[in-house]
Image (spheres, rainbow, N blue to C red):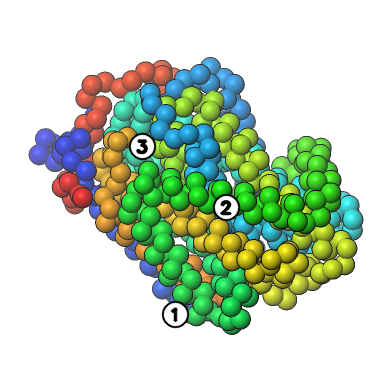
């Protein structure tokens, strides 16, 4: 036990309470990032681009190794001695809803953007040793898209899912935050400043990673609305869309996971699958089938190379510009996604908890590249639309709408595509605001959710960073850097939690905690507000 006097200790099991240091500290850092971007957009863009170049060129090897280590860890969880262990006793969500919530929370608008247009950016690079823009390189674009959103992505996301679920459902510790996973190494110091630093790093990384998703998704919705209604795609329109999306996920966040995000994500998955099926049937079905099957084969054949390529002799910067960007984004999101996976996976086995995301969610993401991406690739290959040149002169969202013009009933498709993107952002930020609120709540049982005002507060704050990024209106690297910079310290937190779990498991085994495990001391001299929040 930590050495506090009796007067300094308040049993966390007695109250919900707010962790003031984490709450205020994270808010202060977010404001410190956002205000300069909004006040000095030109200077902000310059600094951000410099940071992007520095980190991707010097730290690429670290992110690639982290991805491989996460995949190895997940395979051990899935097929090792813990595979049959169960997190809790009652399954809360059907498998369809469970996977749908994972995809909506983990990839959201990012997969709508990337699945449709990533391939066009990739064509500017020599892929697999083939010249840029060549037919062979063109074939690899879909394979690389599925690789980026495939097993390693979801392995990174699920890295801490089992440790968090083990603490929350098996040890029955009524605390749902990232620092608690480090208890096996830090002991009761997780309730002091080391734990607060870990949680603040997690929260800042989550806000920045969320900004990337909003920054990609908002222009898509705005471009769809502008194209269908003859409006100008302006910053003002994007700001209005941002406000409407913020309102949507604020409302659903206030309803909670079961009444809000659960139902919204189910609806969104059905609509997204409907769009995919529509494009597959009315588009070049044979071409989509053959290129998709070919891409799966290329992914399997080149997987190891894709996962380890650093191109040390400088022939291409593709790994640094794209693979490292995605890995860093996933790392920044990983503690949140692990927390969210653990929260909605009550009653499932360890094998289900890790293989569900790595296999089923990877397949779900791959569908977007197979259908939306390969439809655009067909236009490029047949000379109907030079999308690769288009993305160099206009925003990616505008290029997506140009591709959509070749789909029958284009206006209806655009509106539905924009709707799915908007709902994807809303469901993502439902989960993000839940994670932020849970981290700033002193105690939380599996049956409870953080206070409504707390969830709403973070839902609104999440709009600040993308507002600054939209104001800059810089290149895609601005969005990329927001994730990469904060992903670096979060990577340390991620593997600290893994080491702590194995240390804890080695000492205690997979067994429920003691009867008094629910009472965890929190110091009142850190100004923790211990009152029940409703």
* Quadrant, the N terminus: top left
Residue 418 percent across, percent down from the top left:
57, 64
The residue where tag 1 is placed is: 39
The kind of secondary structure element at disc 2 is helix
Rounded to the nearest angstrom, the CA distance separating label 2 from label 3 is: 38 Å
Q: Is residue 134 left or right of residue 31?
A: right
Q: Is residue 45 left or right of residue 250?
A: right
Rounded to the nearest angstrom, the CA distance separating label 1 from label 3 is: 37 Å
Which residue occupies 49% across, 67% down? 466
- First in sequence: mark 1 vs mark 3: 1
Q: Between residues 78 and 33, which one lies in front from this camera angle?
A: 78
The kind of secondary structure element at disc 3 is helix
Q: Residues within 10 Å of mark 1 (few under 14, many from 20)?
A: few
Tell me if residue 366 comes above or below residue 351 in the rendering.
below
Q: Is residue 473 left or right of residue 528?
A: right
Q: What label does residue 271 carry, if any?
A: 2
Residue 170 percent across, percent down from the top left:
36, 25
Q: Quadrant of residue 317?
A: bottom right
Q: What label does residue 396 carry, if any?
A: none
Rounded to the nearest angstrom, the CA distance separating label 2 from label 1 is: 39 Å
Dots 2, 3 in contact, CB < 8 A = no
In front: mark 2 or mark 3? 2
Which residue occupies 42% across, 29% down? 91
In front: mark 2 or mark 1? 2
Q: Between residues 319 and 144, which one lies in front from this camera angle?
A: 144
The residue where tag 3 is placed is: 180
Q: Between residues 152 and 229, which one lies in front from this camera angle?
A: 229
Dots 2, 1 in contact, CB < 8 A = no
Q: Between residues 316 and 468, which one lies in front from this camera angle?
A: 468
């Amino acid at each position: 036990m930590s050495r506090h006097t009796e007067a300094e200790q308040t049993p966390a099991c007695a109250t919900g309470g707010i962790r003031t240091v984490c709450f205020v500290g994270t808010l202060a850092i977010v404001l410190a990032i956002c205000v300069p971007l909004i006040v000095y957009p030109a200077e902000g863009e310059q600094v951000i681009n410099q940071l992007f170049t520095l980190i991707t060129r010097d730290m690429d090897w670290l992110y690639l190794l982290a991805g491989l280590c996460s995949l190895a860890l997940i395979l051990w969880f899935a097929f090792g001695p813990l595979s049959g262990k169960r997190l809790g006793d009652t399954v809360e969500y059907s498998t369809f809803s469970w996977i749908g919530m994972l995809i909506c929370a983990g990839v959201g608008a990012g997969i709508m953007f990337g699945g449709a247009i990533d391939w066009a950016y990739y064509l500017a690079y020599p892929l697999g040793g083939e010249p840029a823009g060549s037919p062979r390189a063109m074939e690899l674009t879909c394979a690389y898209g599925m690789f980026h959103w495939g097993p390693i992505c979801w392995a990174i996301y699920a890295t801490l899912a089992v440790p968090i679920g083990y603490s929350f459902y098996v040890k029955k510790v009524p605390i749902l935050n990232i620092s608690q996973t480090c208890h096996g190494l830090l002991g009761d110091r997780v309730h002091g400043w080391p734990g607060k630093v870990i949680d603040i790093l997690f929260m800042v990384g989550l806000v920045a990673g969320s900004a990337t998703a909003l920054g990609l998704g908002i222009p898509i919705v705005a471009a769809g609305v502008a194209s269908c209604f003859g409006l100008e795609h302006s910053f003002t329109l994007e700001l209005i869309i941002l406000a409407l999306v913020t309102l949507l996920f604020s409302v659903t966040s206030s309803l909670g996971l079961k009444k809000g995000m659960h139902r919204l994500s189910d609806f969104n998955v059905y609509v997204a699958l409907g769009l995919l099926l529509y494009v597959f049937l009315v588009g070049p079905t044979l071409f989509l089938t053959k290129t998709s099957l070919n891409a799966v084969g290329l992914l399997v054949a080149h997987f190891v190379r894709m996962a380890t390529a650093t191109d040390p002799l400088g022939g291409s910067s593709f790994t640094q510009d794209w693979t490292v960007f995605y890995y860093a984004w996933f790392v920044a999101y990983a503690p949140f996604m692990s927390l969210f996976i653990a929260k909605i996976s009550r009653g499932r086995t360890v094998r289900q908890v890790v293989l569900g995301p790595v296999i089923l969610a990877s397949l779900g993401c791959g569908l977007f590249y197979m259908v939306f991406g390969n439809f655009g690739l067909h236009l490029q290959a047949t000379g109907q639309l030079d999308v690769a040149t288009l993305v160099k002169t206009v925003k990616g969202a505008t290029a997506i709408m140009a591709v959509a013009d070749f789909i029958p009933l284009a206006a209806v498709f655009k509106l539905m595509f924009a709707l799915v993107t908007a709902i994807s952002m809303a469901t993502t930020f439902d989960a993000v605001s839940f994670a932020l609120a849970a981290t700033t709540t002193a105690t939380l049982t599996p049956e409870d959710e953080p206070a409504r005002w707390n969830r709403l507060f973070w839902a609104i704050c999440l709009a600040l960073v993308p507002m600054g990024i939209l104001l800059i209106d810089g290149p895609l690297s601005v969005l990329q850097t927001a994730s990469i910079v904060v992903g670096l310290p979060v990577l340390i937190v991620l593997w600290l939690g893994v080491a702590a779990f194995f240390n804890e498991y080695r000492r205690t085994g997979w067994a429920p905690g003691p009867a008094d495990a629910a009472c965890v001391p929190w110091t009142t001299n850190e100004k923790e507000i211990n009152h029940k929040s409703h």
